[in-house]
């Protein structure tokens, strides 16, 4: 999957690129609207992350011209907080989704996944541990035909647990990865999602257990 990032704040552009590359996307980054349009016109991309306020040509103009030329690449527009008007203009210009700055990587990746899925790509990635499977494309947890949907946060927590099976993951790590460094989320928030996940594992009859190490964190156990 190939993604085009058009963002003039270099630190943010580089951070976006870094997050996406870490998640196995290939990424091209450009820093102004004219380059953005030129790259977009190659029609090589599965998704485009487009800032609105850009030098040389603003993001909404890039988007309008692209759409006029029948480039249908899904576009995720970056907007500043409270720019409601930008969202309306963005939709009129042919944007597929929005991401409000500042955002966390989990949210970015979820939006990108949703947009690239729309293009008909089949995401087969699945984590398995013990008797359960976590499906990346349906956000569901399943065991032998029994399945249950997860919310985004539940999915992200379960993904971290299953990607590091039997390893103790500190609560801080969940907060950093899912809510972001700046977040003032309370630790008991993580506990709430863990308790939801335990109920869902129970619902599908899994023998996988999320173990608590009091005051430290969680790990996955069992399921044989
Ligand atoms: Ca900008």
Image: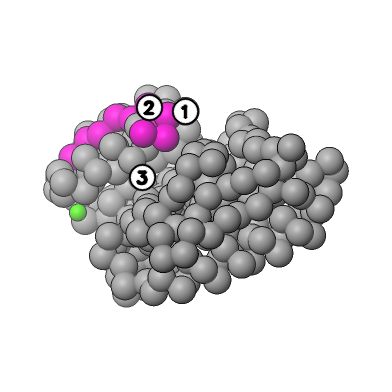
Contact between labelled residues 2 and 3, with CB atoms less than 8 Å apart:
no
Q: Of tags 1 and 3, which is closer to the observer?
A: 1
Q: Position of residue 14 (x, y in %)?
A: 21, 40
Disc 2 C-beta below 8 A from ligand 1? no
The scheme the figure's colours follow is: one colour
Q: Residue drawn at (27%, 60%), measured in percent from left and top?
A: 181
In the rendered image of this protein, does residue 12 appear above or below residue 27? below
Q: Residue drawn at (56%, 66%), measured in percent from left and top?
A: 193
Q: Residues within 10 Å of mark 1 (few under 14, many from 20)?
A: few
Q: Residues within 10 Å of mark 2 (few under 14, many from 20)?
A: some
Question: Closest to the observer: 43 or 24?
Answer: 24
User: Which residue does the numbered mark 3 point to in the structure image?
Assistant: 49
Q: Residue furthest front?
A: 214
Q: Residue drawn at (64%, 60%), measured in percent from left and top?
A: 197
Q: Secondary structure at mark 2?
A: strand
Name the disc covering residue 26, or none: 2
Q: CA distance from mark 1 to mark 3?
A: 13 Å
Q: Position of residue 178 (x, y in %)?
A: 41, 56
Whether 23 is among the magenta residues is yes
Q: Of tags 3 and 2, which is closer to the observer?
A: 2
Identify the mark nearer the N-term, 3 or 2: 2
Picture quadrant where residue 84 is located:
bottom left
Identify the mark nearer the N-term, 2 or 1: 1
Report the span colored magenta. 22-33
User: Which residue does the numbered mark 1 point to in the structure image?
Assistant: 1
Whether 116 is among the magenta residues is no
Q: CA distance from mark 3 to mark 2?
A: 13 Å
Q: Secondary structure at mark 1?
A: loop
Contact between labelled residues 1 and 2, with CB atoms less than 8 Å apart:
yes
């Amino acid at each position: 999957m190939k993604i085009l990032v058009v963002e003039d704040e270099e630190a943010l552009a580089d951070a976006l690129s870094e997050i996406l590359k870490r998640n196995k996307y290939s990424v091209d980054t450009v820093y102004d609207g004219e380059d953005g349009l030129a790259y977009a016109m190659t029609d090589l991309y599965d998704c485009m992350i487009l800032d609105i306020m850009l030098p040389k040509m603003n993001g909404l103009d890039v988007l309008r011209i692209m759409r006029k030329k029948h480039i249908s690449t899904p576009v995720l527009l970056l907007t500043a907080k409270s720019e409601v008007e930008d969202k309306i203009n963005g939709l009129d210009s042919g944007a597929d989704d929005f991401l409000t700055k500042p955002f966390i990587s989990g949210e970015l990746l979820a939006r990108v996944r949703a947009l690239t899925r729309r293009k008909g790509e089949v995401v087969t990635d699945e984590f398995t541990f013990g008797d359960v499977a976590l499906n990346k494309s349906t956000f569901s947890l399943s065991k032998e035909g029994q399945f249950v949907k997860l919310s985004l946060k539940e999915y992200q927590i379960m993904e971290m647990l299953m990607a590091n099976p039997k390893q103790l993951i500190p609560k801080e790590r969940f907060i950093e990865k899912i809510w972001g460094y700046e977040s003032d989320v309370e630790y008991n928030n993580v506990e709430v999602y863990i308790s939801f996940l335990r109920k869902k594992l129970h619902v599908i009859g899994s023998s996988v257990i999320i173990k608590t190490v009091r005051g430290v964190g969680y790990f996955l156990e069992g399921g044989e």
